[in-house]
Image: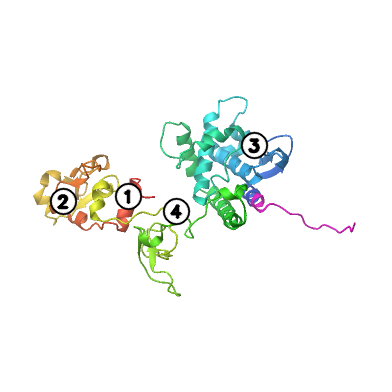
Amino acid sequence: MFDRPISHRYEDPVDMIWIQAANDLGIEIVRSPDAFATYDGKGTLTIAEASYFDADDCLAQMIFHELCHWLVAGRRGLHLADWGLSNLDDRDLTLEYATHRVQAALSTPYGLRDFMAVTTDWRPYWDALPPDPLKDGDDPAITIAQAAAHLARLSPFEPVLTRALHATAAIADVVRNVTNESSLWSVTQPRHRLGSLLSDSESLNCGACAWAIPGNSDATETLSLSCRQHNLDENNLPGVDPDEQACERWEQKFAIEDCGSCGACCRQGFDLLTVSAQDPFINLHPELIQLRDGGESCVPRPDGVCVALDGNGVAPDPYRCRHYDTRPQNCADFEVAGTACLLARRRVGLSR
């Protein structure tokens, strides 16, 4: 047999992405049959060789999981063996579950939640996680995961994790189209070109979305709408094609008739409703006016809800302003389905 010199070797690109991510955070990856995954607290993360993995595991997922352990442990975790966790009993079970939650939260926006799923006996907890794994609930792991997710948005973690997740998703976008259902790549989710996951319904398009507004076409005049879901800065809105498949943030267009089931602008959507000195509302309803420090007039919002708001948003008791016909000018100027409307709806959880 012809004996040729070998100067290069093949490496899995996703594994390389996450090895580099670990390196960028000051962690060296070592492969060994002596441990499934262990961190020495001195910058070396040892992970088992591929022969010890389940068929749906990969080195990239293992590294990502360990980095999420670091996030849960806090910055000091870098200097703690095994991130300060014990695997001898269940004393750190809540911290393990918090790691699952932040891992799911970080991977979901990139369509990688199932691809980056945890392994072995931990899988049932992972599979039972809700769509938003950081949402308030009774699980004590949630508060810990929320703090870890906040840390992930800070330096040095944010740029490293964002780059690695984005690169992994980019590879998934290519491989997904040439794989079959038995491949782990088939569980990755496609994304809209603006970054959000695509809607599950192929029949929904950007032109029918509440947050698409007429915009300036680009040089080729192929884009006629602008998307406020992906940028609230009206001077820098990305363009979308009316006929392209919508993203997961799609919402049906709505009008003033729909305000009764929303009421976001009159409740926790905003903290303050100011009233100018010239506004007739001050004289018409002096009992509702409160003076702030500095003499500014406002309508109180205890617990975020305007004192003039009635109803609960559910038929037959929709949200309604008791003084709608004489409402303050700031309220009259509020644009239904405008950018401020979107912001208010996001704050109360009605829009993504």
Residue 199: mark in rendering: 4
Mark 2 and mark 1: span between their CA atoms? 20 Å
SS at circle 4: loop
Residue at position x 33%, y 52% in the image: 343
Mark 3 and mark 1: span between their CA atoms? 44 Å
At label 4, which amino acid type do we have? Ser
- Ranked by sequence position, the earlier of labels 4 and 1 is 4
Residue that carries the numbered disc 3 in the rendered image: 41
User: Is residue 1 found left or right of 263 in the rendered image?
Assistant: right
SS at circle 1: helix
- Ranked by sequence position, the earlier of labels 3 and 2 is 3
At label 3, which amino acid type do we have? Gly
Residue that carries the numbered disc 2 in the rendered image: 324
At label 1, which amino acid type do we have? Arg
Q: Is residue 207 visible?
A: yes
- Ranked by sequence position, the earlier of labels 2 and 1 is 2
SS at circle 2: helix
Q: Is residue 4 magenta?
A: yes
| Residue range (magenta) | 1-16
